[in-house]
Image: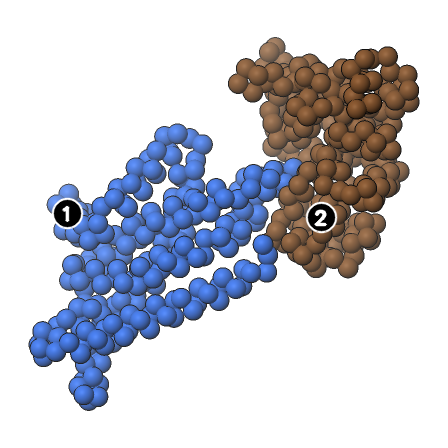
Chain colours: A blue, B brown
Amino acid sequence: MLSYILNLLPSMLEGLKMTISVFILTLALSLPFGILIALGRLSGNKLISSIFQLYIWVMRGTPLMLQLVFIFFGLPVVGITFDRFDSALLAFVLNYGAYMGEIFRAGIQSIEKGQYEAAKVLGFGPTKAFIRIILPQVIKRVIPPITNEVISLVKDTSLVYIVGLGELLRAGKIASNRDASLVPLAVAAGFYLILTALMTEGFKRYEKKYAYFE
Amino acid sequence: MVLEVKNIKKSFQGNIVLSDISFGLDSGEVMAVVGPSGAGKTTLLRCINALETSDGGSIKVDDKYLYREEKGKMIYADKKEMKDIRKKLGMVFQNFNLFPHKTVLENIIESPVNVYGVSKEEAIAEAGKLLQMLELTEKAEAYPHQMSGGQRQRAAIARACALRPSIMCFDEPTSALDPELTEGIAAIIEKLAGQGMSILVITHDMGFAKRIADRIIFMEGGQIVHSGTKDEFFEGSDNERVKRFIQS
């Protein structure tokens, strides 16, 4: 049994590498993108705000799997081609950016008006006030909901098989079919659990780091 | 005159909140704006701090216009002028609005260092003096949530003083204080005025107004009903409305 699992490991680890790449890059890009979406959504300009609202609606209102298919198989029809990995990453960032955007929007709206006013009377312009005064308070408030999204993201990475990328779950499935065994799937489950445990712990620490103020 | 308010008007959705308010504040003078709730006191203060726009009239701080009316159009100070005016105009909010993620010291030096380009050493030295004056030295490294209401208020005053404004505005400074702390804040206002700062205080606490003010403005229904020196106000006023308010 143990030697069977050890035999599985090389291909599984190869898949894990892909899973982690998609995960890390999506996370790193969708967070700043989400802040931009939130700011666009909260823009005083009605046109800009409704464009972002439409964007959020489309991205949250259609399956991520469908968005992947559109970007990888659909865009080439109109002459825009990305390779497999870039397509997957683009779809994930566009999709997760919308979710992150809504979380940041709620966070920004939860900050008391008085904080903006205090910054204003102290001479801050809007950009500086946002970066130095508002955003640090927003980050503290959005860590718990973002942790939820991050855990979803760990598992959603399995969707990249659609565009032919070999990730963790696909490696497990291939071995499972080949050997008529559920063990490879159990091994894949183990990896996902380890990843989510690491993320949960990491974000818990991050949350603690922000516990110094209320 | 350090502050000149002329013919300020403000309405919200057709509801007139301020109609034609004019007054001046002299250097080193303490002025209290009193009156019942809904009189427009806070709106007036917000117009002076450019937290609200005004529908008409002008406000001049030292010799710079925050805004003025020209041929029926409001002309606002540009970005740079605004920054200069804000430096001269301090504001202590009713609920203080300290930055919760910053210590008291960081709250005080935030604007001088990051907006006005004061060196950090200089800002910290200046903050040290303010903290000492306000008896907050041992709270310099504390966060707002670790302090009492009175301490938070003094921290907010220190922050507003950091750029040595010529005018300091207080919005209902006694609303959350017990009598002992009220005396404390009165003493602080006296001290600031003694240093040449002009003070504008919004309050509905008549005892407090009597304690601190040189001059008192009584507002009701968006208008100045009566204004005069403290003595005129409390002893000689023949205005029926004012008499009733003082007695109540």
Viewport quadrant of the C terminus of chain B:
top right
Q: Residues within 10 Å of mark 2 (few under 14, many from 20)?
A: some
Towards the viewer: B96 or B102: B96
For label 1, the residue is A74
Which chain contains the residue that carries disc 1? Answer: A
Task: Decide which of A69, B169 is in the foreground and name it.
Answer: B169
| Residue for point 45% across, 32% down | A44
Q: Residue at x 59, y 56 (%)?
A: A213
- Name the secondary structure under disc 2: helix
- Chain letter for mark 2, please: B
Left or right: B4 with respect to A41? right
- Residue B140 visible? The answer is yes
Residue type at mark 1: give it: Gly
Q: Is residue B1 visible?
A: no
Q: Nearer the viewer, residue B18 or B38?
A: B38
Numbered label attached to residue B149: 2
> In this picture, is A136 found above or below B238?
below
Mark 2 belongs to which amino acid?
Gly
The x, y position of residue A40, in whole percent, is 40, 39
Above or below B208: residue A27: below
Residue nearer the viewer, A152 or B38: B38
Q: Left or right of A115: which side holds A148?
A: left
Asked if B214 appears above or below A35 in the picture, the reply is above
